[in-house]
């Protein structure tokens, strides 16, 4: 079908505008990546603005991985992303499966309580008091236990389990499986798409943990990577950035800006590497609760 002149002009304008928006969006990412690999002397000679470096160096990355503070913060974030995601998936899927079965008594009351947590937030001070009374201040578990189950993810997981036939459970029980055996051997293997989608959501949330770390972590040796990165970016020249951040920015051989950019790249790459492997399942998982025809 031949397009009119107005349609061709409109399509051309769309391509130009979207192309410009894409360039504006991608330029900061490109600049951070390039600066992190720029030779320190070239960076200083060009007064900190480099688009096409003549030589690529790993100086900033070598420096970061040689500091105990950065390695420790990376280890904390990796623990949060792995252990936190695994525990959240186990508890969310178990609770969602239980709520999806009509034989559970009081499930409507429990669902109402879950909905209340979504609609009404207790606030920062009550959350802090609860964490303090549980003795979790300055513990990495303070970054996992308070956010172990996301109410919205729980409801979506429940809607997924609603579509699993009860007959499969009955057949498994006839073969000798108990409730736990049915859940782990029958239900979870059928829930790969849902687990992959919500696992990605939980992993991103745990890896990017920042605000809860500000509230509950006073010992900087237990701070996650995002908190260390924040202190490097805005407080690197003062003691308020933490001793670890000051230590990392004190080397005069490497410009502070290249170290910051290298830290940003390292903090971003893990999620970018994980997403392509989960994309196939993620596309299916995001359709949870949709109308099927």
Image (cartoon, rainbow, N blue to C red):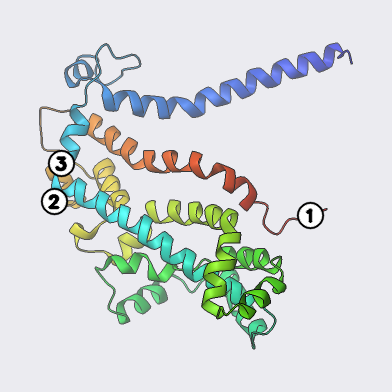
109 left or right, relative to 87: right
SS at badge 1: loop
Above or below residue 159? Residue 50 is: above
SS at badge 2: helix
The residue drawn where x is 52% and y is 45% is 278
Crowd rating for badge 3 (residues with CA inside 10 Å; few <14, some 14–19, many 20+): many
The residue drawn where x is 70% and y is 81% is 102
Q: Which of 7 and 97 is in front in this view?
A: 97
Look at mark 1 in the image and give the residue it sits on: 292
Q: In the drawing, what numbered circle is on residue 238?
A: none
| Whole-percent x, y for residue 248 in the image | 15, 41
Q: In the drawing, what numbered circle is on residue 248?
A: 3
The residue drawn where x is 77% and y is 14% is 9
- Answer whether residue 100 is visible to the viewer in this image: no
| Whole-percent x, y for residue 255 in the image | 18, 28
| Whole-percent x, y for residue 20 in the image | 57, 21
Query: N-terminal of the two: label 2 or label 1?
Result: 2
Q: In which quarter of the image is residue 106?
A: bottom right
Crowd rating for badge 1 (residues with CA inside 10 Å; few <14, some 14–19, many 20+): few
Q: In which quarter of the image is residue 117?
A: bottom right
Look at mark 2 in the image and give the residue it sits on: 243
């Amino acid at each position: 079908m031949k397009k009119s002149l107005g349609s061709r002009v409109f399509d051309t304008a769309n391509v130009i505008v979207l192309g410009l928006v894409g360039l504006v969006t991608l330029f900061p990412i490109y600049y951070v990546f390039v600066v992190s690999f720029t030779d320190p002397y070239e960076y200083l000679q060009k007064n900190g603005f480099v688009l096409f470096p003549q030589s690529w160096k790993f100086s900033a990355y070598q420096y970061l991985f040689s500091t105990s503070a950065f390695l420790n913060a990376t280890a904390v974030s990796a623990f949060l992303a792995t252990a936190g995601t695994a525990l959240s998936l186990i508890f969310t899927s178990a609770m969602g499966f239980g709520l999806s079965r009509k034989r559970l008594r009081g499930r409507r009351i429990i669902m109402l309580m879950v909905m209340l947590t979504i609609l009404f937030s207790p606030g920062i001070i009550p959350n802090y008091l609860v964490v303090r009374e549980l003795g979790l201040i300055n513990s990495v578990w303070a970054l996992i236990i308070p956010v172990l189950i996301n109410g919205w993810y729980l409801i979506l997981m429940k809607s997924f389990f609603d579509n699993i036939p009860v007959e499969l459970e009955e057949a498994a029980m006839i073969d000798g499986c108990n409730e736990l055996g049915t859940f782990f051997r029958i239900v979870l293997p059928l829930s790969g798409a849902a687990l992959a989608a919500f696992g990605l959501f939980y992993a991103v949330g745990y890896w990017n943990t920042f605000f809860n770390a500000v509230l509950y972590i006073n010992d900087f040796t237990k701070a996650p990577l995002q908190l260390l990165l924040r202190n490097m970016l805005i407080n690197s020249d003062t003691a308020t950035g933490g001793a670890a951040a000051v230590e990392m920015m004190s080397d005069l051989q490497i410009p502070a800006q290249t170290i910051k950019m290298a830290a940003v790249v390292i903090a971003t790459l893990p999620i970018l590497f994980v997403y392509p492997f989960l994309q196939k399942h993620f596309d299916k998982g995001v359709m949870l609760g949709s109308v099927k025809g």
